[in-house]
Image (cartoon, rainbow, N blue to C red):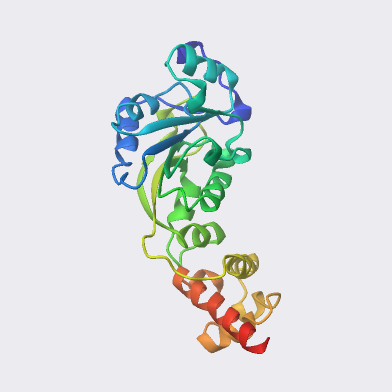
Amino acid sequence: MSNHFHHNKAFGQHFLKSDDTARNIVEALQPLTLANNILEIGPGLGVLTQFLKKIEGKSLFLSEVDKRIIDILINEKGFTREHILEGDIIRIDPTKYIDGPFAIIGNFPYNISSQILFKMIDLKDRVPLLVGMFQKEMAKRVAAKHGNKDYGVITVLVQLYYDCEYLFELPPEAFDPPPKIYSAVIRLIKKTTPVNFDEKLIKTVVKAGFNQRRKKLSNSLLSVHGAKEAAAVLGFSDKRAEQLSVEDFILLANMIQQNLTITE
């Protein structure tokens, strides 16, 4: 079928060729104990789907924007429309289709991979696990540790809620058609110990800090009310954003919130 399928560049279609690789990606879902449902984003011609269907006791849902692939999924793969989320996953609310928690898996279109991660964060109360193929640079950013040049806004915002594992990389020739870059698979598992922080405030702090990442926090956080004072109390003033761990950002946001509460 793939030999006769015309790939749509607009949808970022690069289909995985190896069944062995697909099996390894699906096996990365093994921590799947908190969800009875699986959502595959961008199933393509089904190289992952064939193994996902074999997982016992789980309901499989597929998110697909290409109507040609949806026809294949229904007419050739035996899926019903009730299990297919048709349209752009970024604009769809999966909770309207799926009851209860669900794991997310996919060889994600690279042009929307960061949006998929932000979608996961929005749905964090329902998504305990994500296994995904990303552009290598994006995967490294998500999995980065503080003090690393890859460490940035998306790193902190994802790792506030999820532990990240960088699993393995794949060369361009592993795909049809081959992309121009290397790819990598990561696994995100929801943290079991919740930490209290003001979500809106910490996002503001993180984005402000990295917006001028070469500057010290005493300067980059000037736009955030109370942040400069809080950074001074914590001894962060002379540090740059990339030097703060996720836990440090939580401390900083909570200190700002605490100071604001006292002065109100």
Residue 187 seen:
yes
In this rendering, would 263 be left or right of 254? Answer: right
Q: Quadrant of the C terminus?
A: bottom right
Residue 49 to residue 154: above or below: above
Tell me which corner region of the image, top left, top right, bottom left or bottom right, holds residue 247. Answer: bottom left
* 224 lies left or right of 195: right
Which residue shows up at 30% across the image and 46% down it?
Answer: 33
Q: Quadrant of the N terminus?
A: top left
In the depicted view, which residue is nearer to us: 44 or 74?
A: 74
Please provide percent x and percent y for residue 214: 60, 71
Q: In the rendered image of this protein, does residue 187 appear above or below residue 261?
A: above
Determine whether 261 is above or below 17 in the image.
below
Give the residue at x 50% y 62%.
Answer: 156
Instruction: Count the marks.
Output: 0
Residue 38's x, y, as percent? 41, 36
Residue 186's x, y, as percent?
Answer: 40, 47
- Front-lying residue, 41 or 34: 34
Residue under the point 64% across and 83% down = 260
- For image coordinates 56% across by 47% down, the residue present is 119
Q: Residue furthest right?
A: 223
